[in-house]
Amino acid sequence: MIVRIFDKLIFGLTFILALQGPLLVDHYHQYLSGLYEATKFQVDGYERTAKKHEFVDLLSMIDRHLQNTEASVRTDARQKMATLALFADLKVGVDIFAKGNIFEKVLFMLNPTRYTALKGSITNFKMGIPFTSSGLAFGLIFGLILNLLITWPFKRRAYESRKS
């Protein structure tokens, strides 16, 4: 009887915990979208500058600036290259969050190179209940799996003690 109560309590806790996954994914998506839009605005400004000064494209302007004798111009060009790399990564993420399933989104989020963004999302995260069928299904399935993993040793021990 105690094992059954313990099992139900653990399931309730794992279910609530598992429901937070889809909410965190949505929260991260919002964070990622905002960062993408801000970075896109910046890259668009770089491209306008390149056109204004009659460069073929942004990369040719950056290449020219990397060869400049002025150290600050070279540093600025390296910063622009870093911004372009960030923008490319954000574009991949925005596409995954627009078209991918929850597992692809979680894999994208948990990539070690993106821990800073995940940390930023978690800082402002509030627990709740997802109101989407996929969020509820994920919570239920993941909660059941967690419950089974946590309670399996106890159930096995209880079964063996009844058996002997």
Image: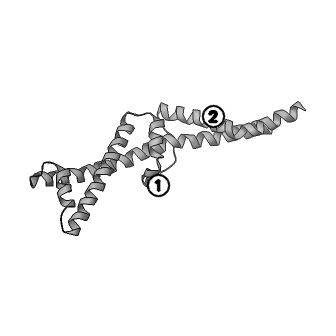
Colour scheme of the rendered structure:
one colour
Q: How far apart are marks 2 and 1 (CA)?
A: 27 Å
Q: Residue 100 appears at what percent x and percent y?
A: 41, 34
Q: Mark 2 points at which residue?
A: 144
Residue type at mark 1 is Lys
Q: In which quadrant will I find the N terminus? A: top right
Q: Is residue 41 left or right of residue 55?
A: right
Depth order, front residue of 163/59: 59
Considering every residue shown, the one lying at the far right of the view is 164
The circle drawn on residue 19 is none
Q: Residue 152 appears at what percent x and percent y?
A: 73, 37
Depth order, front residue of 128/39: 39
Q: Relative to 46, does residue 146 appear above or below in the rendering?
A: above
Q: Mark 1 points at which residue?
A: 119
Residue type at mark 2 is Leu
Q: Is residue 114 left or right of residue 67?
A: right
Q: Residue at x 24, y 62 (%)?
A: 76
Q: Relative to 75, does residue 1 appear above or below in the rendering?
A: above
